[in-house]
Amino acid sequence: MSLSQNLDPYLPGSSLVHRLDPRVKVGWALGFILTVALTPPDAWPVGILLVAITAAVAILAEMPAGIVLRRAAMATPFALSALPLLFTVSGHELWTLPWGWTLTYEGAVRCVSVVMKSWLSVIMAGVLTATTRMPVLLGALRALGVPRLLVATVNLMWRYLFVLVAEARRLMHARSARSASSPRPGLHAGGSIAWRAKVTGGMAGSLFLRALARADRTYAAMVARGYDGDIRTLRLTPLTLHERISIILGLAGLGTVAGLGLLLWG
Amino acid sequence: MHHNTVDIQNLVYTYPDGREALHSVSLSVEAGEKVALVGANGAGKSTLLLHLNGLLPAQSGYVRACGLDVVKENLGRVRAAVGVVFQDPNDQLFSPTVFDDVAYGPLYQGLPEGEIRQRVAAALTAVGMIAVTDRASYHLSLGEKKRVAIATVLAMDPEILVLDEPSAGLDPRARRQLIELLQSLQPTQLIATHDLALVRSLCPRTVVMNAGHIVADGETTAILGDYALLERHGLA
């Protein structure tokens, strides 16, 4: 049913990036994001290089540009939060607004830098989630040392996110099905905003209670199968030498880029 | 002037992931008829029913209920005329108390308060749940929730009543009470179910679905007596 529309960011494919070992992918992605974060705002050449890397990875992953950009829109809150930088950083004044705020060159550079950094990080993370199934991704995180409990929590959260969204959608469908206009003349359908808000609040509360009840039932099911609080998973296949070298080389490359950026423009 | 009819022609529905759920389905129901829609799980019964009040838009072909085209402009009037009771009452009950849930429909329609109270009382009495009016629906048993879910739809006084698996999960007594209730209700009824005993006691006409097609449509005794047909379509 259209009720459980696809929220999973994974896009099936067989590109180079899809086939890369997940641990290598995650290592490089995290390294990239760190490099982006460490790059000084006015290191334009480094910035261009990072944009080129991002574009190359997205192309290698065979991701449609439209999807890349749509998912990159997740960076919008960060971009918006950077807007005040335009006016709060002192320096060469460029433009003064009617009510006294002054836009400075340094502020503009910083703002653009924050926007670009968030954008690139989100795109790289987006490519990662589009080319790697979540369970595999979590396995990679586990292999790279993230604690079992954390990974298990994210795993359950991921699983039940879909369940909850589907349930919320069904509740909204139930509401739509009973939101009708009477055939009698002179009646105004819809109720007041306050009433509709009250109903929505009730639905949210109802969903929360159900989530709690479901959590209890899930826990009972796990206990019934022997769960004792310790998360145990299958042993991971160790990284091959080839994969180790790939990760190290990749991180070394990114480290060099970051280092150059910091040295020359920091 | 509404006609109590359902008129579906060449309805096609494909899920977002590409699976075809309905392959050019056509169905007509006359006023006052009680029709059973039977089929194995996954036959497309629920998908078909969700088109009747516009919860799923017709991708191809058309759906008409009570003389109204089920399209965006008419949804308000369609939903007043077609009441759908979902398979899982938990999906249908979303308000803090039973009263609030049953009153939601009439309240939304803008009916005067006195009439709303009267309709809620009448609906709950019809399903035998007047005693739980002020309780939280969350605490009711499955059978009680199913009956309250029916009441939430009855309160809107629909001309067509659509029920998706109404007897699933009910104990024998609750099932019997449900059948008696449905027998006593006036509106045109379209009931999706694989409870063949319910079909026999309630619906003179049966439509059989399999894998998104309507494979049989006729008198209940004839269809349910044809063992080969039932077996072919996953019902025996």
Image: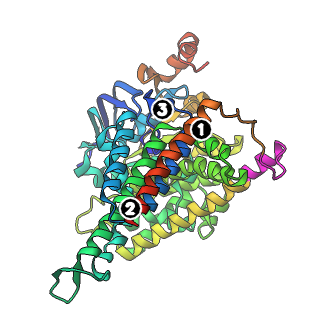
Residue marked by disc 2: A264
| Amino acid identity at mark 2 | Leu
Residue depicted at x 49% and y 62%: B102
Q: How crowded is mark 1: few (under 14 residues within 10 Å), some or many (20 or more)?
A: few
C-beta proximity under 8 Å, tags 2 and 1: no
Residue marked by disc 1: A136
Residues at marks 3 and 2, common chain? yes
In this rendering, is residue B155 above or below B97? above
Q: Nearer the viewer, mark 2 or mark 1?
A: 2
Residue marked by disc 3: A18
Callout 1: SS? helix
In this rendering, is residue B80 above or below B11? below
Q: Earlier in the sequence, mark 3 or mark 1?
A: 3
Q: Give the range drawn in magenta.
A: A217-231
| Amino acid identity at mark 1 | Val
Residue A43 sits in quarter: bottom left
| Amino acid identity at mark 3 | His
| Chain at tag 1 | A
Callout 3: SS? helix
Q: Residue furthest bottom?
A: A100
Callout 2: SS? helix
Instruction: Compute the Cα span from label 3 to label 1.
Output: 11 Å
| Chain at tag 3 | A
Residues at marks 3 and 1, common chain? yes
- Can residue B87 be seen from the camera position used here? no
Q: Which of marks 2 and 1 is nearer the N terminus?
A: 1
Magenta span contains residue A41:
no
Q: Which residue lies furthest to the top in this view?
A: B228
Name the colouring of the figure.
rainbow
Q: Which of marks 3 and 1 is in front?
A: 3
